[in-house]
Amino acid sequence: MKKTVLVLLGLLLVFSALAIAQGYETMPADAKIIPLGQADTPYADAQPGVRGGIFYCATISNPKKWNDVTAHETSTTQYTGLMLEGLISTNPVTVAIEPELAKSWDVSEDGLTITFHLRQGLKWSDGEPFTADDVIFSFNDLYLNEDVETDTRDILVLPDDSYPVVTKIDDYTVQVTTSVVFRPILNSMGANILPKHALAQYVHKLNPDVPVGTFNSAWGLDTDPSELVGMGPFIVESYTPDQNVIMRRNPYYYHYDPNGVQLPYFDKYVVLTVASQDVSLLKFRNGELDALGIRAADVPILKSEEAQKDFTVLVNPDLPNYGTSWIGINEDIGLAEGTHDNERALFRTRDFRAALAHLVDKQAIIDSLFNGLAVPQWSPVSYLSPFYAGRDYYGGPVTEKDAVIFEYSLDKAAELLDGIGIVDRDGDGWRDYEDGTRVEIELNTNAGNTVREGVCLIVADRAAKIGLKLNFVPVDFNTLVNKLFASTGELIVLGLTGGPEPNNGANVYKSDGGLHFWHYSAADNPTEVEKKIDELLNAGVSTLDNDKAFEIYK
């Protein structure tokens, strides 16, 4: 259900708002037309709207920054995703790659060169022209600049450890060349484009007067919103911590409806900060919010109120989203400080991790927290992806025939823990380390996310049944992200966005990836398993044949 609502919300935003500042005098010749209401298009059921109004929604976290390049967290990217656009985008209905800031592209016969033809006559939200210089700046001076802290660089690494060469041909043509075959090159070029005229001053490479790394703190929360510039449908107007983020319509947005009306339709987009998902639900039911990314457990009560309160709940139980939820086990806990020796040794033991996997009662989670509207996933690649390991072949049916499954089993979990010497040594009902100290592990997730809190409670309950003590402590989302990157958390339940392309997870699964959060020290000292994963990820992008890539990833 959540996927359906979010897709519909995405459509609504892509097609929304009214100008509050001077924009284009006439529609740019290269404007992108969204075919609302037109037959035989993904938008056949979405009719053109009327300009005006304010769109209200809610979130449980404050933003951490406005810098999309350095952001790791959705509390930031939920806003930067509305402020910025890439050369290409993914259609929210069909999930197909389609033109965005680039109106078209050509791929060479050998697959080593892509030539992007940019839309002409477009402007940034402050009225400055958009050109190839912004694309070159974004890739060469930001994403591929070692002084800039960004995860995007991880998905641009070629199998020979080089990077794509991005070259300006003219003001509206950019060429991308790779030294070797790199199957997902087009997909990887979808990173957001940043305004050179607004941000070059913070890049040491371009402005030696500022220290190295200055860009990493640019566009922080202390930045005057008037300095924020984008190509997306909305721009931040104001931010009040713990209350709201107000975004105004971009008067120079280049999307139009079939009637020639500039999008978005809404004047403003307001995100309220609330304490929990329960509060969001209450506000939606009271008519204070226009849309809600609902939990599956909310479906029954909302369905019962549809007719009375004039909203529609669309449920498609066969359409899970690309995102995944996971338990992060910090194998580097205490490494820098010389502490947590017992925990670190335990977390680095495969049989402990396998035992924990057997304690995840996925069916109970699906039934009690998702109202049956979820599917178990047995692969780091998203269930919807044609590369998902549970398929029989690329794009084939999901049978799970060849999936590696850790089914819920208290007996198997207990047997694995017994086998590594994690047993109850003093008869108090709790398992101990070999030195006799009790095994007590802190389990965190972001406070207010009732689904993740529920997952933690279920896992902790099942662990307790076999004498493994997990202490659940919810914390603020941005604090949790800080713990993740500082390697100070023990077990953390969070989620990752996903997509059809496995290489988009290279920043997570490669041993030197910026989001390899469970074992950051692997960048210098990877295990044999991590070396093998690196090898497979490189092999999967080294063929242009999706069927061959599927067999490699599988």
Image (tube, rainbow, N blue to C red):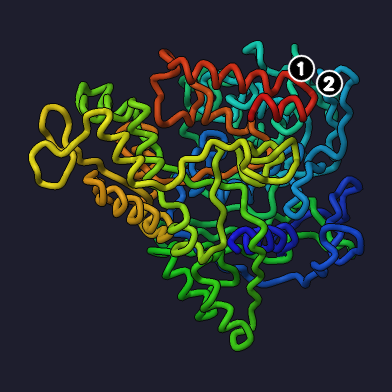
Q: Which residue is mark 1?
A: 181
SS label for mark 1: loop
Horizontal and vertical percent for residue 138?
66, 29
List the single residue furthest toward the left. Answer: 426
- Where, quadrant-wise, is the N terminus in this rendering? bottom right
Picture quadrant where residue 340 is located: top left
Position of 47 relative to 260 (above/below): below
In the image: residue 178, left or right of residue 535 = right
| Label pair 1/2, CB-CB below 8 angstroms | yes
Q: Amino acid at mark 1?
A: Val
Q: Examine the image and state in which quarter residue 178 appears.
A: top right
In this picture, residue 442 sits left or right of residue 403: left
Task: From this view, report whether residue 276 is shown above or below residue 250.
Answer: below
Q: Residue 150 in the image: state x and y as whole percent.
A: 54, 29
x%, y% of residue 114? 83, 24
- Determine which residue is flagged by label 2: 111
Q: Is residue 181 left or right of residue 457?
A: right
